[in-house]
Amino acid sequence: MDVFVQHVVNGLALGGVYALLSLGLALVFSILGLINFAHGELLTLGGYAIYGGLAVLALPFGGAVVVAIIATAVAAMAMERVAFRPVRDASAASMLLTSFAVSALLQVVLQNAISPRGKAIVTPAFFKQAITISDLVVGSIQALSIVATAILLLLLMVFLRSTVLGLAMRAAAVDFRTTRLMGIHANAVVATAFALSGILAGVAALLWVAQSGSVRPLMGLVPVLKAFIAVILGGLGSLPGAVVGGFVLGFIEVFLRAYLPGAALEFREAIALLIVITILFFRPQGLLGRRVEAAR
Amino acid sequence: MLAVDDLAVSYGAVHAVRGLSLTVATGEIVALLGANGAGKSSTLNAVMGLVPAASGRVEFAGQSVSGLAPERIVRLGMTLTPEGRHVFPNLSVDENLALGAATRNERRAIEATRAEVFELFPVLAERRTQLAGTLSGGEQQMLAIGRSLMSVPKLLLLDEPSLGLAPQIVDLIFDLIARLRTRGLTILLVEQSVDRALEIADRGYVLRNGQLAMAGRAGELRASTGVERAYMGLADV
């Protein structure tokens, strides 16, 4: 039983990171209809910002994290301004290809300007400790992941429910044109979506780097693919769906790693995807997605 | 208050509106009539900046608004209640109204406007926390109009407010439009219920194939017969 609870904690921690990333993807998708594959590079940039904050600016770890979150938010907005705004009215395919271009460009720049190989990040000693709650031993990184995810999701929910800009984001996700009729500036909504996705990626970068202890130019690739799967699983276009999808995917991975017999262990990614496909077979609109309805 | 001069709207090779000029004076209700596809909605959308005008000028309150984005035009005091209502289905009634007031800052003034909207549409007050997508068609139309009123417009463009509604609800909506005028609102009304629209309007314009076919006092247009009524889309009456 204790072991089971331990796996639940691990599932929450991993699922939380996926949830932050998939929520960032879903926020931008809900507004622009763009799957931003350069989202993974925001995670990478966040990681390098932490590295730079520590190694170059000699900041304390907390300071480097703040720098990284600001950096990813600014980078996300810059990405929108430079790369996506000019193709906003173009086809979905053009926007998708633009995001691949941004992704590839940032990878190459990081490889050439810094190093194609990874850089180690010295995480605080605290990260290697464990927290004991009665019988339960929780790694401090897991605890940090769960707490950070919970706080961030809560803040985002408050923003989306109780500020005019937040309401506008939810409205624009369904009907952008009518949202503009409310006097809401289209560019403000789009820029906010990117800024939020950047902040989420910045916090995800902290959690990812805390786990791996290093940064690499291609580190964003796998997480963004996982986040994309989580978005589809939860229901494309649904923000709560993206969060749920992230957690479900995290739980699937953790439980497969824990309970698969040794011989099957190396196929766990494939088995995880098989489970996702099975879910989508029965709920093609995703866990929380709505079936596409004709406009009322 | 509104002056449209030689307006043209095209979708690719299709000319939806050509050479249209019309005016709306302060305090008037002006009806814009015509059959399906005559260019009524295209006109409103172009005035509002939702679709680009191929040519022509639009002046609102003495100021050119040609080429302005819809969000800028709303801030000048003109707004549109779109055809098909377009309430935000995933937001509550209260949240829809709050977005309607997005251009305003003073909490107490917004609160006062909301009280007025609830006075006009008591049913909305009962449904404040309900998601707009779960309202009936008539309630959604009331919410759409109420949401427009939250910005305290000088000029309200109403696109087919009676579309798809039950007859009693249509009565209610038209009564309401007449009441809005007594509160000092100027209204440009697009309608397919021609006779109903002309009952409450001061003047009317009739479009046919994107061009002005007739214009005049509401009484004169109501008295028109035969071919003229066909222009208004009344061929089947």
Image: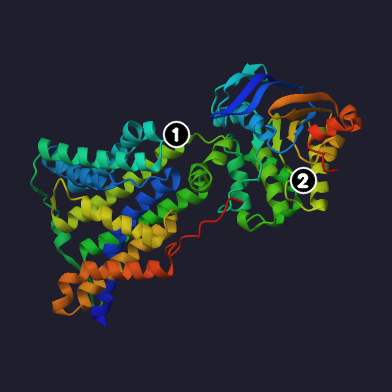
Callout 2: chain: B
- Residue A235 at what x, y percent from top left? 42, 59
* Residue kind at label 2, given as amino acid type: Leu
Give me the C-alpha separation between circle 2 and circle 1. 34 Å
Residue located 67% across and 16% down the image: B62
Q: Secondary structure at mark 2?
A: helix
Is A220 or B75 nearer to us in this picture?
Answer: A220
Residue A187 bears which disc, if any?
1
Callout 1: chain: A
Which image quarter: residue A179?
top right
Residue located 16% across and 36% down the image: A109
Task: Tell me the mark number nearer the camera, choosing from 2 and 1.
Answer: 1
- Residue B149 at what x, y percent from top left? 69, 38
The residue most toward the bottom is A1
Q: Is residue A258 left or right of residue B68?
A: left
- Residue A58 at what x, y percent from top left? 13, 40
* Residue kind at label 1, given as amino acid type: Asn
Disc 2 with disc 1 on a shared chain: no
Q: Is residue B43 left or right of residue B170?
A: left
Residue A241 vertical position relative to residue B202 in the rendered view, above or below: below
Residue named by callout 2 = B120
Residue A252 vertical position relative to residue A31 in the rendered view, above or below: below
